[in-house]
Amino acid sequence: MTGIEYKGKRIPCRLIIFDKDGTLIDFTATWVPLIRKRVAFLLKILGRDGELEAFFLRSWGIDPLSGKIDPRGPCPVSPRSDEIIIGTMALYQKGYPWDEAKQWVAQAFDEADADGDWREKVVPIKGIQTFLSQLKEHGFRTALATNDERKDTEAILSHLAMDGLFDVILCAGEVNPPKPHPKTIFTICQKLSVHPDEAVMVGDSVTDIMMGKRAGVALTIGILEGGVTPRKELEKVADLVVDSIRDLKFFK
């Protein structure tokens, strides 16, 4: 029987479900540069200089000076479609028509995302490929539950040589309601014929942990390395909080 060691106990589990951004890859190093690029393209479309940059960044929950991300803001948990709506609302608040604003924001996102292969600059958590490979070798089923787009998720995993390490991948818009509703976990478990109480949820956000709790998984684990949520926030909701994913101990 496979399982995980937790507080001196061995908890049987067959399935490990991971979040992606902030859990498998460094969130700030990966996404803040891209979001800044999206803002730059939007300002270019509007014919404006940097006067609106700080306003836009704050709208997405990013401090314009430090680049620090609000862990309970939209940036760590919102899918791309929601981020476009947030940008549209920011423009609307500045007096721009809603329909035109939405078109401009979507255009800026598309142009920024297509400007060079930003996916090749994604920063993985140290040793994550080896960690996932060992889980598979030990007989665990693995799944990925992310709010990122399918095409970006697959491109990132391929670039990091992790595309064959998950039995199931669920992305933005593929399950509704989204996180923190437990339907994503229920769907994964159904696909793999595993009961939720035989699964473990690993993530860096309160949203990830609450999804696991509501699904009734065997254990919820908060990860600090690569994420933006402080330890004290994760400890309020997670069964276990570790500095690094490499600190987890599984057995077979």
Image: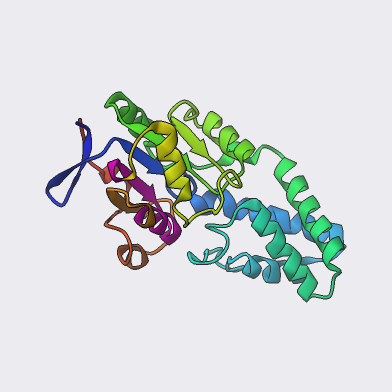
The correct choice, above or below, for 62 with respect to 141 in the image is below
The correct choice, above or below, for 5 with respect to 59 in the image is above
In terms of image quadrants, where is residue 154?
top right
**Residue at horizontal 47 percent and vertical 33 percent from the top:** 168
130 displayed left or right of 1: right
Residue 209 painted magenta: yes
**Of residues 150 and 213, the one drawn nearer to the viewer in this rendering:** 213
In terms of image quadrants, where is residue 121?
top right
208 displayed left or right of 216: right
**Residue at horizontal 55 percent and vertical 54 percent from the top:** 177
| Tally of marks | 0
Colour scheme employed for the rendering of this structure: rainbow
Residue 67 painted magenta: no
Asked whether residue 16 is in view, the answer is yes
Asked whether residue 19 is in view, the answer is no
| Quadrant (top left, top right, bottom left, bottom right) of the C terminus | top left
**Residue at horizontal 54 percent and vertical 29 percent from the top:** 158
* Residue 232, image x, y percentages: 33, 68
Specify start and end residues of the magenta stretch as a single range: 197-213
* Residue 159, image x, y percentages: 55, 30
* Residue 38, image x, y percentages: 71, 54
* Residue 17, image x, y percentages: 39, 42
